[in-house]
Image (tube, rainbow, N blue to C red):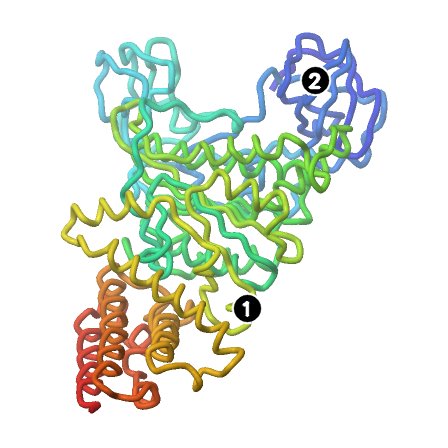
Amino acid sequence: MPGLSTARIVRVSGPLLEVEGLSGVAMADLVALGEAELPGEVVAISGGTATVQAYEYTGGLRTGDPARTLGRPLSVRLGPDLLGGVHDGLLRPLADAPTWLPPGSTREVAGGTWEWRPAVREGDLVEEGAVLGTVPTPAALEFRVLVPPGTRGAVTWLAPPGARVSTEPVALVGEVVVAMTADWPVRRARPTATRLDAGEPLLTGQRVLDAVFPVARGSTAAVPGGFGTGKTLLLQQVAKWCAADVIVYVGCGERGNEMADVLAEFGDLVDPRTGRRLVERTVIIANTSNMPMMAREASIYTGVTVAEYFRDMGHHAVVIADSTSRWAEAMREWASRSGALPAEEGYPASLPSALAAFYERAGSFTTLGGGTGSVTIIGAVSPPGGDTTEPVTTHTERFVRAVWDLDRDLAYARHYPAVAWSGSFSLDAEAVAHWYAGREDPGWAARRAQVTAVLAEADRLADLAALVGSSSLPSRERVVLWGGRLLREGFLQQSALSPNDSHCSPEKTRALLEAVLGVIEACHAAVQRGVTAAEVEELDYSPLLRAGGDLAPDDVAGVEARRDRVLAALEQLR
């Protein structure tokens, strides 16, 4: 692209450069650096000198090398070619390139050939956000070509139906050329008509999340946990099974072997909606720890911009960010290079506002075209040493609606997902309860309250039992401890490796929870009529405890049959 001005580099310090002669440059403008035209962003302007952060390794750049401004902020090209692709933090494709792209690579998503189907006629008056046409995709996801924001008028030209390259024009609205692809600045949220109240749950197929710590569609959640607690595994499970139209998986600063596992699993997993590969409705942004630091900082914004793009089409998108701690570390490294005043633990003072601005881009909206779409953001947090009092974790918990705190002791006890019921919360639970109440499940809130009460009382008694021994406790307290164990092992625990248990339908989740709670009540009833706690504990509960792994994800009748068998055995105790 021809530059709007030319200049020279006067200082190089790692990814931080100073450039003189950039006339007319503005903050956040994109700059091409050196003969290789490495991408960089203007972060400060003082007199005639602009400070630029490079998104690439700057080895080989020297003072006197040319630079030119591109006259626009960091933007990415959005289009149907994103689906099923793997990209770096600047949304450049990695599928046909080395993991480390050559410095200065300006590769954008290549224009593929897609079947264009017009939805309007020439001469029609259209408003911003209106659907001009559709493009079918292999994932049975309707890709909609929209009138760009801020554009309205008559359709003066329309491409006929048929196969077209995604970068070619398909319509002309007034004097504005519209293609299947569109460019958008990653740090600017795409416009919407109105923000809606979030109430419908985002079903994940994970029982502990759906029944105890739900997140609403269009809401936000954080997954803090130390090394080895299963953050990546839980996020992968959510990505595989959540009720979303589009998954945007951002591997931000993760190890290369973990991203390789993600790619392999997504490539093999069958989409339950279509019977095809799940990856066909997934956009993967792989910015691993060996890639440039500043591209890692941009990758989070790139991911949410892609999600907003599909939201504007009326789809429900989920952003999985693994992990936001690596993003914050990139900001800290950049702040130290630029001389910014450090705050807590060396992080920049702007960390809380950056986190808030990121999570604020989630939501359920009425789109410009009058439809409804949503962006749900779920971010992992990797506190060093598992210290959840560090700044990234504490600030994140201020801005999200749900926290799924992963406990090291549970993980080491091989209890997965290792979501700690004592440190987790959901501010969406009340809204989700209203949603269930309006859909013939008024008992959802009561079941959730009973679960939290049983777990809290069992935890309280566990500390006492550790001192005096459980056999020294009265029968009622022993049954409380036993009920907590039944709830943990029969309902909350879920195997990601089991074909039957890796995903649980809402119907089976409800049946399992009702079965376990019913058995716990029967245990208390047995003790009240004189049965000893030892007799209650010695009963065979294995049919119920194995129901999650033995029965199909939607086998409600099988769960009820096993519940009845255990209840009958309890009733015979006298």
Q: Residue at image x 63%, y 54%?
A: 387
Residue 461: numbered disc: none
Residue farthest along the left direction in this orientation: 440
Measured from the top left, where is residue 404 in percent x and y? 46, 54
> Looking at the rendering, which quadrant does residue 121 occupy?
top left
Q: What amino acid type should be assigned to the residue bearing mark 1?
A: Asp
Q: Which residue is mark 1?
A: 409
Toward the viewer: 255 or 161?
255
Measured from the top left, where is residue 92 in percent x and y? 56, 38
Q: Where's the N terminus, which quadrant?
A: top right
Q: Does residue 540 sit above or below 224 in this rendering?
A: below
What separation in Å lies between label 2 and label 1 (alpha carbons)?
54 Å
Q: Does residue 185 sit above or below 135 in this rendering?
A: above
Circle 1 Cα neighbour tier, 10 Å, few/some/many (<14 / 14–19 / ≥20): few
Measured from the top left, where is residue 285 in percent x and y? 53, 44
Instruction: Please state if 480 lies on the left or on the right of 77 as rendered.
Output: left
Q: Residue at image x 33%, y 34%?
A: 364
Q: What amino acid type should be assigned to the residue bearing mark 2?
A: Arg
Q: Residue at image x 37%, y 53%?
A: 213
Q: Which residue is mark 2?
A: 68
Q: Does residue 138 sit above or below 58 in this rendering?
A: below
